[in-house]
Amino acid sequence: MKQKIVYYCTECGNETPKWAGKCPACGAWNTLDEQLVKPSAKSKVLQTKPISQSVLISDISSAEEIRFKTGMNELNRVLGGGAVRGSIVLVGGSPGVGKSTLLLQLCGNLADSEKILYITGEESPAQLKMRAGRLGIDKGEILVHAGTEISDIFSAISAAKPSVVVVDSIQTTYDSEISATPGSITQVRECAMAIMRLAKEEGFTAFIVGHINKSGNIAGPKVLEHMVDCVLYFEGDQSLGYRILRAAKNRFGSTNEIGVFEMADKGLKEVLNPSEMLLSGRPTDSPGTIVTCIMEGSRPILAEIQALVAKTSFASARRNSNGIDFNRAMLLIAVLEKLVGLKMSECDSYINVVGGLRIDETSADLATLLALVSSYYDKEISSGLAAVGEVGLSGEVRQVAQINQRLAEIARMGFSGCIVPFHSKGEITAPKDLKIIKVKNIKEAIREALTNG
Ligand code: TYD
Ligand code: MG
């Protein structure tokens, strides 16, 4: 039979019958990889039993989702209250962020109650042992299997009959029946699919590690993300001490929650009070900084927003924004130029959210705008003042959701005042000792912020 050739994009997983210099799906250059497909020769591990008969939805016995705690509150929170038995969790992150550390610590926590098999394709068992020693994991039964070939891994799983399996990582796992190289999109997809099928059949919970490439995608992201039950991303700069675990997809819970960890010398430590950590070392008497409160799921977190506005020495002003959507930042700068009359087009503007936090809600608008103004006038805002509110195109300050929860967190962290939108859904219950300053538009907000400073 004639062999068919298809081309896969190594960035996005798109498949095309014809080679091109640029991937038609994601637009990346020179990423199409040639792969041979043998239509009839299916991978051995994929040949499972014939599909059972269809049943009426009313006849399906509703098995309760059974959860078990992972021993780490931050991880439980992101998973939606613990890991679900029989589910597949993909843990993505750039190399060195701490995925193996997280999962090994998870194994350490579960070792007494679960039967664990740790499949390592990246490190030798001796290296794993060294790491476990460093993390203080010496008790309990954790089976380690060093292997990368999928049928070899399957035999290890059948022999061990584990309840939790860690695959570190999916990029090193390969199926020898498929000609593609390990780590290629075909291998990643086929192996993940095979592990997933086995997990559903045998009922074990699988944690699969997936490295992400420079553009922030798990190699073959599209194919993996829709297959698994839960996709967690582990983020954070290696130079920063802390890491954020974020759910990008969760069939058993919300995707809004984040977990915060700190990388210490003995592994990852949970950070129960992220606001405190993010605000530590904050300058108290410099212009261009103010604190806001964002909601990460059900959890309020304080974030410091900094801005630097300085006369430009270039033909056109430079602008950069870190942690806040660039377009959103441009919009705020345009509002300042047009409605407040600041000559922003003659200034370079830089915005930064301290600690590498990424904000994607509009409630930080007001704080961003105030930080810009404060830097423009070179006048500091009182360090006891916070601001929460969305800014509209006509300069109005609009309401934000869950205002009372935010104010409670701001008060808890010892702030003395907070600028809030005049109109709020529901009544604002001001926490004790927190002065609430209601403003209708940005001019009022700027006046309040700079005179209170
Ligand atoms: P690792 O879990 O190997 O990352 P990944 O599996 O995502 O590639 O984490 C490696 C980094 O973590 C490395 O830079 C060293 C650091 N680290 C610590 O700081 N303390 C520790 O106790 C451990 C185990 C790792
Ligand atoms: Mg690793």
Image (cartoon, helix red, strand yellow):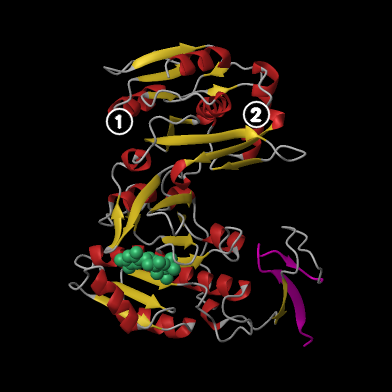
* Viewer-side residue, 128 vs 437: 437
With 131 as the anchor, is 46 left or right in this view? right
Residue 373 position in % (x across, y down):
56, 24
Q: In the depicted view, which residue is nearer to us: 310 or 70? A: 310
Q: Which image quadrant shows ligand 1?
A: bottom left
Residue 269 in percent (x, y) is at: 28, 55
Q: Residue at x 19, y 72 (%)?
A: 140
In the drawing, does residue 112 fall left or right of residue 220?
A: left
Check disc 2: other Cα within 10 Å, few if <14, some if 14-19, many if 20+. Answer: many
Dividing the picture into quarters, in which one does residue 296 lie?
Answer: top left
Question: Which region shows up in magenta?
Answer: 1-18
Helix, strand or loop for disc 1: loop
The image quadrant of residue 84 is bottom left
Q: Write down the residue under mark 1.
A: 413
Q: Is 130 colored magenta in this rendering?
A: no
Q: Is mark 1 within 8 Å of ligand 1?
A: no
Instruction: Work out whether residue 152 can be spotted.
Output: yes
Give the CA separation, mark 2 to mark 1: 29 Å
> In terms of sequence position, does the residue under pointer 2 or pointer 1 come before the other?
2
Mark 2: which secondary structure? Answer: helix
Q: Specify the label residue 333 is tagged with.
A: 2
13 within the magenta span: yes
The spot of residue 437 in percent (x, y) is: 42, 13
> Looking at the image, is 81 positioned above or below residue 168?
above
